[in-house]
């Protein structure tokens, strides 16, 4: 449980406690889970880059595949990665 301070029901998380708690959670993950988490954290930590026209076309094609039922379910990926 994270320590909170504040008088409302939501509280405010002490950032140093939250940071240490997240580090402890990461230490409990498998190597495969850490690799999956790395992708998420990197996308949050680095500035957003501009999408090039050819990349935009690939993204649109991927969305069309999903709309046509040719996508991969997130649950299947999570199960494969053990998360």
Image (cartoon, rainbow, N blue to C red):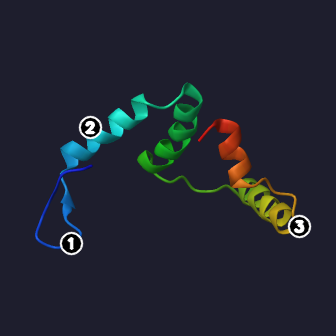
Q: Nearer the viewer, mark 3 or mark 1?
A: 1
| Circle number at residue 68 | 3
* Badge 2 element: helix
| Circle number at residue 9 | 1
| Circle number at residue 20 | 2
Q: Residue furthest front?
A: 1
Give percent across and percent down for residue 30: 53, 28
- Residue toward you, 33 or 54: 33
* Badge 1 element: loop
Give the left or right position of residue 50, taking residue 62 as reference.
left
**Residue at screen point 65% across, 45% down:** 78
- Residue toward you, 44 or 14: 14
- Residue toward you, 44 or 13: 13
Mark 3 and 1 residues: CB-CB less than 8 Å, in contact? no
Q: Earlier in the sequence, mark 3 or mark 2?
A: 2
Residues packed near mark 3 inside 10 Å, few (<14), some (14 to 19) or many (20 plus): few
Give percent across and percent down for residue 1: 27, 49
**Residue at screen point 50% across, 48% down:** 43
**Residue at screen point 27% across, 42% down:** 19
């Amino acid at each position: 449980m994270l320590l909170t301070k504040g008088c409302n029901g939501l509280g405010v998380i002490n950032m140093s406690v939250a940071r240490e708690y997240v580090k402890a959670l990461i230490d409990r993950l498998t190597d495969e889970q850490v690799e999956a988490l790395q992708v998420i954290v990197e996308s949050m930590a680095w500035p957003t880059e501009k999408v090039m026209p050819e990349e935009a076309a690939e993204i649109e094609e991927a969305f069309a595949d999903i709309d046509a039922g040719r996508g991969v379910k997130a649950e299947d990926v999570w199960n494969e990665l053990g998360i």
